Amino acid sequence: MRIRALWALCATAALCGCQTGNQADYVQIGYGPSFDVAHAQCEMQKGSVDQGYIAIGSPGLVAGAGIGNALGNAIAEDQYMKNCLIINGWKRAPHGQGAAATAAVAAGASPTPYGIARAPGSWINTALLDWSDANKKCAAGDKAACATRAKLGARLKAAGVIPSSV
């Protein structure tokens, strides 16, 4: 009996050691609310993915079904949190890089031009922001910015987006 209890304790410790949940594990990848707001919204909704279960049989079978259901629900909730936070502009950082990115932003060093890492494929958003920046500098008389604005404008028009200053 002691060996089973030891195995159960080891399995619980291993599963608990895999939990992630603090902001140091996430980096901002797009526009959206702050991490605390996004995390709270996702946390409130993650229970919606839980599944119930029915088990009839010996106590061991019922207990095993309950544990299996709990593990399945935990996995589904973790996946939901991951996807929900991505939708809100946050992504889990590669192991060991979350704290460095958070520290760099806290120190004032912006890892990208606008303080956030762009999601893959969002070159149009980045180009629009860069075009807007170049447009302001061009209006102030910066000739290099005017050339950048023209180049970005041509790329955006080719993609079907017509930039205009607001």
Image: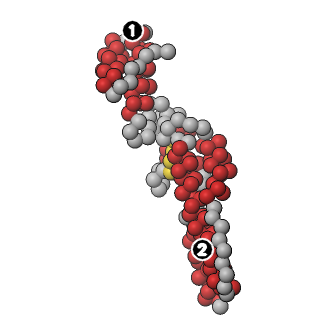
Instruction: Give how far across and how far down residue 123 sits, in percent.
Output: 38, 33
State the residue in front, 46 or 36: 46
Instruction: Look at the numbered disc 2 and give the secondary structure of its residue.
Output: helix
Q: Is residue 96 above or below residue 41?
A: below
Badge 1 amino acid? Gly
Residue that appears at 52% across and 38% down:
105
The answer to whether 139 appears left or right of 43 in the picture is left
Question: Residue 36 appears in which quarter of the rendering?
Answer: top right
Residue type highlighted by circle 2: Gly
The circle on residue 164 is none
Answer with mark 1 or mark 2, whichever residue precedes in sequence.
2
Q: Is residue 36 above or below residue 133?
A: below
Marking on residue 68: 2
Mark in front: 1 vs 2: 2
**Can residue 145 be seen?**
yes
**Residue at point 56%, 42% (across, down):** 88
Q: Is residue 48 left or right of residue 100?
A: right
Indicate the quadrant where residue 162 lies: top left
Frontmost residue, 132 versus 72:
72
In percent of width and height, residue 143 lies at: 33, 12
Question: Going 33% across and 22% down the picture, which residue do you hit?
Answer: 157
- Residue 104 showing in the rendered view: no
What x and y, as percent, mark residue 22? 60, 52
Circle 1 sits in a helix, a strand or a loop, which is it?
A: loop
| Residue count near mark 1 (Cα–Cα under 10 Å), binned few <14, some 14–19, many ≥20 | few
User: Mark 2, residues whose alpha carbon is within 10 Å: few (<14), some, or many (≥20)?
Assistant: few
Q: In the image, residue 138 lies at what x, y percent?
A: 39, 12
Separation of residues labelled 1 and 2 (CA atoms): 66 Å
**Label 1 belongs to which residue?**
141
For the point 56% across and 47% down, which residue is it? 85
Query: Residue 124's quadrant in the figure?
Result: top left
